Image: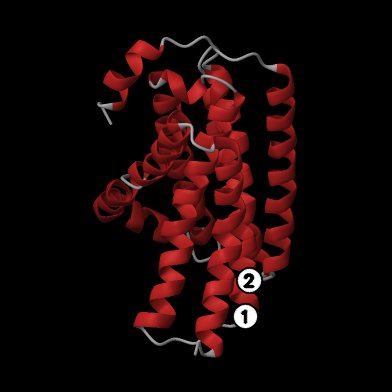
Amino acid sequence: MFSYDLSIVWVGILIALIPAFALSIYLARRMKSMWLVFIVGAIGWTVALIRGPILQELAKAFLRSWILSTGAMAAPYISTAINSLFAGVFEEGIRYGLVKKIKRARADSRHVLLFGLGWGFGEAVLIYALPVFSDVYLRGLSLPFTSVLLGALERNMAIAIHVGMTFMILQAVTDVRYLFIAIGVHFTVDFVGVSLYISTGNVWTTYITVLTIALILAEYARRLIKAKKPIETDYTAIPKQLGQY
């Protein structure tokens, strides 16, 4: 029989993961190409984590001392800005590379949507589901239900943002300016969300801001799905391209 802590962990994990995965099942069904795109999206976010070791080495070399020299008031915001910039550059850069290189990832709106869902799902598993599971099952910590629930809801907002960003990157395939717009949007989401929490200490301000951005990007994706024709795809090149990743 589950304890209270174990029960809320599974409630949180299900809320964080089931909506995106259920939508993916509905869209992909038995189409292997869509599941491949979903998996490539999840792998793409994982690859983007390479920014962590790079940023750590830069911090050791000069960033940490420079940030601390800016003073106690400015340092948290500068640190947040640097982390947000690295997240935007690496995530959107890798997303762009994959969408441009793997033609099936942009074959039609459903494939693009599955790529974004996979990207967000991979992030939700690695930075929410596994840590929460580990904290309770392995470390024996007790987590507040509100904290677990808010984290799960935030993951759904993040997935919606990743879907919108993927459609923005789709535009970058034919107009590279959208890549820089995507990096700017990603930077803004991360920087504003964290900075609001630093300045106010109120998590609701951050969540409302992130939710607003998620809804805007979801509407952006919806309009592109409705208006944009699929990019023509040479499926004979797919196996070779997938083999490169």
For the point 74% across and 57% down, the residue is 208
**Residue 65 picture quarter:** bottom left
The residue identified by callout 1 is: 145
Position of residue 34 in the picture relative to residue 190 (left or right): left
* Picture layout, residue 12 above or below residue 145: above
Mark 1 residue type? Phe
Name the colour scheme. Answer: secondary structure
Q: Can residue 30 be seen here?
A: yes
Position of residue 157 in the picture relative to residue 77 (left or right): right
* Residue 236 placement (x, y as % from top left): 35, 11
Q: CA distance from mark 2 to mark 1?
A: 6 Å
For the point 33% across and 42% down, the residue is 47
* Residue 225 placement (x, y as % from top left): 68, 25
Nearest the viewer among 187 and 160 is 160
Helix, strand, or loop for circle 1?
A: helix
Nearest the viewer among 133 and 238 is 238
Q: Can residue 191 be seen here?
A: no
For the point 74% across and 39% down, the residue is 216
Nearest the viewer among 38 and 190 is 38
* Picture layout, residue 119 above or below residue 99: below
- Which mark identifies residue 149? 2
CB atoms of marks 2 and 1 within 8 Å: yes
